[in-house]
Image (cartoon, helix red, strand yellow):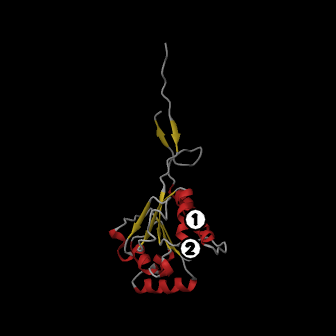
Amino acid sequence: SCTRTQSWFSIRLTPQARAVIFGAGHIAAELAPLLKQVDFQVTVFDDRPEYADKLRFPTANEVICGSYEEIGGKLCLDKEDYAVVITEGHRHDFVVERQLLAHPPAYLGVIGSQTKTAAVNQRLLDCGFSEADLAQVHAPIGTKIKAVTPAEIAVSIAGEMILVRAERRESQKSGGCPMSGSQSRDLLP
């Protein structure tokens, strides 16, 4: 006769982080598929219907056309999201950043020169945000690799996001497998 024994195994379950790209221009077109390849769920948001098009972003999980003035009307962001602000000609960066800082995501990166960043930061301070609030913003966005082309800039942004995600995972570890130091969940076969 056969005797059945019960066995257990553990696997690490890590939910995909969501990356929301505000602006659907040339850099976003390079960034969206790259972020998808490194296990982010990707949402693209733009106010221009000809750019906020699923055909332009076939790898994105979601493409939203809406007003930058009222992001919350079209998109619900939470503290675990990763936000990238790369709007057309930086015209809407302040409006988007102001809304995101009111309820900060896990990562907020904003493209732009140091001069543009300083001008936007001053406007945000005038709106009542603190230096500590602004310190949460990755601006200028990306790792320093002297990126020039949209593809290189996308790699720079993705690299910084991967680093922030890894650092967040390390800091959120609790319990789990004592052998590997990673979080595990026991499952029945």
| Secondary structure state at the residue bearing disc 2 | loop
Badge 2 amino acid: Ile
Q: Is residue 158 above or below residue 121?
A: above
Badge 1 amino acid: Ala
Q: Nearer the viewer, residue 153 or 110?
A: 153
Q: Nearer the viewer, residue 75 or 2?
A: 75
Q: Position of residue 59 (x, y in %)?
A: 50, 58
| Residue in view at x 39 percent, y 84 percent | 127
The residue beneath circle 2 is 141
Q: Nearer the viewer, residue 106 or 42?
A: 42
Q: Position of residue 61 (x, y in %)?
A: 45, 58
Q: Is residue 8 left or right of residue 163?
A: left
Q: Position of residue 90 (x, y in %)?
A: 49, 80
Label 1 environment density (alpha carbons within 10 Å; few <14, some 14–19, many ≥20): many
| Secondary structure state at the residue bearing disc 1 | helix
Q: Nearer the viewer, residue 58 or 104?
A: 58
Mark earlier in primary sequence (2, 1) = 2
| Residue in view at x 59 percent, y 46 percent | 180
Label 2 environment density (alpha carbons within 10 Å; few <14, some 14–19, many ≥20): many
Q: Position of residue 64 (x, y in %)?
A: 40, 66
Q: Is residue 154 left or right of residue 54?
A: right
Q: Is residue 10 above or below residue 78?
A: above
The residue beneath circle 1 is 158
Residue furthest left as drawn: 73
Residue furthest top as drawn: 1
